[in-house]
């Protein structure tokens, strides 16, 4: 692994030295580029000593010979060509703006424009700068290009303020960078149809029935499938999540809308992952006006919503169908029952009663129940890591299906 580490100017620049060491511990060869501002906070000699490689600090060499000048003028092309990944940490608001708008006035920004490999950006700045509309717009532009953003952590900042803006931990940034390089394209040529989030079933014009699903697991699956080369269609219930770049998002509200969206896109899909927490019941005839509160008890007649997973099971053909089972008890048995009744190839089960995982959490712990009878336990991990474990099994199912 060859990684070009760009160091921007900011108090967090000193953490880039720890990041360089973490990358090398994971087997990477590291070459460093420092902006002029970065050299106000930490010396190039630090990175040269840690990495064993020269540190690039200027677009043009200070040497007097014409040959030196010519070599330095194309050095950014050489650096872009020879490295597999560009990692910028800390990535300042100034660098985000340059990258987003294609400005090139130093070595790092010119190298960015010449770089064709994977790019990881780890921003760090004051909380008000991070929240500014211009910075967020630049981040959206860079995400849309497929760049990986390692978001800053919230906490006490060097400026004395508290909030998001602190550079993520160097070990975490290193893990993201290495994972980006090791990512496979094993879903290339597949179209993955994923459902995510809850549905909202109206009781009247202002009230609805729903559940605690955040959609985070489905969105993590969409990002992971995209990164592994798949075309991804994400049918999403109402969630407070940013749409993953490079993913086609179809937004729905009710179970019936979700059913129509999924069945309508089914012919395009080769893999279906039903991770949405669809409401089981709805009011068939919703009142046109708000139901007024009274002292009397109120009974509501609820009809079952469409069983989308069962319908997909009937129509699946040679597609791979994955269901989810969020349970409070007897999870493996319920997952097996759902797999058989609804013709799934695998069911992902999780106990939502366990604290700190599942609904609304960034972490999960699941059990993969396969039609072969195999059961795989996946311990507590971030949902993105869980997503990759699920996709690992799906690629095995696909391989077995074509043999």
Image (cartoon, helix red, strand yellow):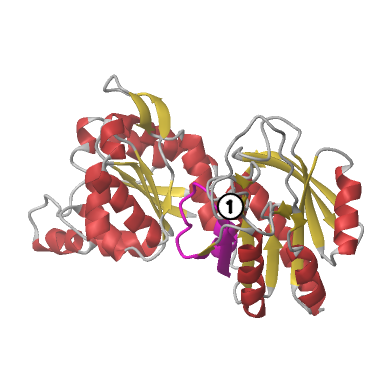
Quadrant of the drawing holding the C terminus: bottom right
Nearer to the camera, 400 or 7: 400
Which residue extends farthest top?
160
**Which residue position is annotated with label 1?**
220
Extent of the magenta region: 222-249
In terms of image quadrants, where is residue 193?
Answer: bottom right
Nearer to the camera, 177 or 139: 139
Mark 1 surroundings within 10 Å by alpha-carbon count, few (fewer than 14), some (14 through 19), many (20 or more): many
In terms of image quadrants, where is residue 182?
Answer: bottom right
| x then y, percent, for residue 127 | 31, 31
| x then y, percent, for residue 379 | 74, 39
Residue 12 seen:
yes
Which residue shows up at 73% across the image and 53% down it?
281
Magenta stretch contains residue 13: no
| x then y, percent, for residue 174 | 49, 42
SS class, disc 1 = helix
Tell me: 402 left or right of 89: right
């Amino acid at each position: 692994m060859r990684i070009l580490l760009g160091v921007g100017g900011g108090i967090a620049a000193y953490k880039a030295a720890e990041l360089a060491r973490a990358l090398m511990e994971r087997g990477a060869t590291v070459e460093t580029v420092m902006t002029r501002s970065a050299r106000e906070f930490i010396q190039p000699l630090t990175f040269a000593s840690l990495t064993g490689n020269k540190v690039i600090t200027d677009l043009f060499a200070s040497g007097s010979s014409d040959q030196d000048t010519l070599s330095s003028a194309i050095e950014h092309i050489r650096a872009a060509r020879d490295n597999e990944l560009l990692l910028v940490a800390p990535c300042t608001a100034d660098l985000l703006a340059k990258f987003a708008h294609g400005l090139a006035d130093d070595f790092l920004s010119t190298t960015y424009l010449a770089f064709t490999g994977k790019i990881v950006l780890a921003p760090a700045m004051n909380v008000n700068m991070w929240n500014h509309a211009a910075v967020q717009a630049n981040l959206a532009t860079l995400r849309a290009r497929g760049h990986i953003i390692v978001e800053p952590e919230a906490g006490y900042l060097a400026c004395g303020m508290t909030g998001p803006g602190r550079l993520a931990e160097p070990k975490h940034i290193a893990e993201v960078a290495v994972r980006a390089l090791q990512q496979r394209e094993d879903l290339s040529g597949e179209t993955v149809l994923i459902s995510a989030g809850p549905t909202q079933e109206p009781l009247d014009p202002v009230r609805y029935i729903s559940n605690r699903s955040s959609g985070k697991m489905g969105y993590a699956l969409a990002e992971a499938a995209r990164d592994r080369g798949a075309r991804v269609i994400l049918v999403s219930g109402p969630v407070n999540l940013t749409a993953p770049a490079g993913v086609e998002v179809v937004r729905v509200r009710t179970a019936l809308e979700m059913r129509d969206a999924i069945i309508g896109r089914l012919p395009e899909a080769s893999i279906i992952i039903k991770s949405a927490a669809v409401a089981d019941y709805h009011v068939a005839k919703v009142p046109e006006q708000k139901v007024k509160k009274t002292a009397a008890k109120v009974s509501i007649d609820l009809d079952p919503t469409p069983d989308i997973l069962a319908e997909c099971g009937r129509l699946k053909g040679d597609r791979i169908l994955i269901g989810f089972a969020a349970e409070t008890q007897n999870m493996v048995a319920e997952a097996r029952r759902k797999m058989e009744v609804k013709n799934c190839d695998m069911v992902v089960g999780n106990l939502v009663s366990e604290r700190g995982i599942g609904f609304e959490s960034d972490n999960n712990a699941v059990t993969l129940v396969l039609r072969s009878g195999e059961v795989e336990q996946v311990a507590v991990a971030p949902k993105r890591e869980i997503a990759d474990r699920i996709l690992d099994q799906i690629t095995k199912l696909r391989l077995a299906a074509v043999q």
